[in-house]
Amino acid sequence: MSRPGRLRKFRCAGRVPNERWHAAGQVAASSLSTATLAIDTLWAVPEVFEEPVLLDGIAFEVTLGGTTGSVGRIGVYAPMSERNDYPGRLLWDGGEFTTTGTGAKASASRRLLLRPGLYWFVYLAGVAAPTVRSSSTLIRQFGGFPAALGAAAGVGLSIAHTYSAGGLPTVFPVSASWYTTGPPIVYFRTVDAGWHLLVPHPAAEDQAQRSHQ
């Protein structure tokens, strides 16, 4: 089992009673809310892992279905580099989900090994917006406060992006803005990363490749 105080999380593979999902961006347990988020908008929520994790599922929950044609996607992005936390390369596109009906929408088509560091969990809706599970309290205030301070910290990034049946963009668009309330909940499920400790962080791997070009 993981040691107290660590963010390492895993489930016992194949044992349903022990299967647990975790909400990206949440720093503590809290009652979640719901939100109807604008379509054709990428909503990115940061999550920091202190130890290696092996993702084997990502998901979101529809609490009120959208009208005819409503669809959604989720995915995971690495940061641009070890010194630039802005979202960069797409690591996992969870595929397209019909969101006219309620319930959990999960992708468990692969496993993704992540080194310790920051990653971005992304939600995108198209055609007609469903109402999805969201967060209103105890959100990681990763973006901090603006120069004028105030009471609204940045909790995630959003940017207009036309929904495409072809998938999420392979590189996150530039010039996203911080939003301060109601991020969508993108859930993740993990298994023990075990001995896989030498896999480089995707940002470091990209940086190494560029240095040899």
Image (cartoon, grey):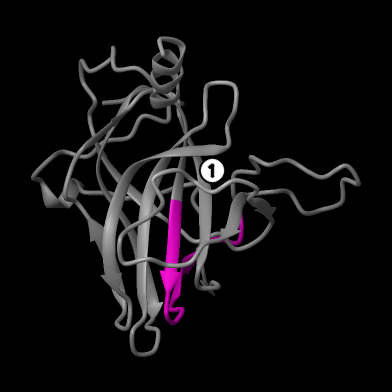
Judge by depth and name the residue closer to the eye, 50 or 97.
97
Residue 196: image location, x then y, percent: 23, 18
Does any portion of residue 138 appear in the rendered image?
Answer: no
Mark 1: which amino acid? Val
At 49% across and 46% down in the image, what residue appears? Answer: 172
- Residue 135's spot in the image, x, y percent? 54, 60
In the picture, the quarter occupied by the N terminus is top left
Is residue 11 positioned above or below 178 on the image?
above
Which residue is at 54% across, 72% downward? 37
114 relative to 159 in the view: left or right: left
Q: For the residue carrying disc 1, how many other residues have a C-alpha within 10 Å: few (<14), some (14-19), or many (20+)?
A: some
Q: In this view, does 156 lie above or below 128?
A: above
- The verdict on residue 134 being magenta is yes
Q: Quadrant of residue 52?
A: top left
Name above or below for residue 27 compared with residue 126.
above
Residue 57 lies in magenta, yes or no?
A: no
Which residue occupies the foreground of this view, 170 or 190?
170
From which residue to which does the magenta span run?
122-138
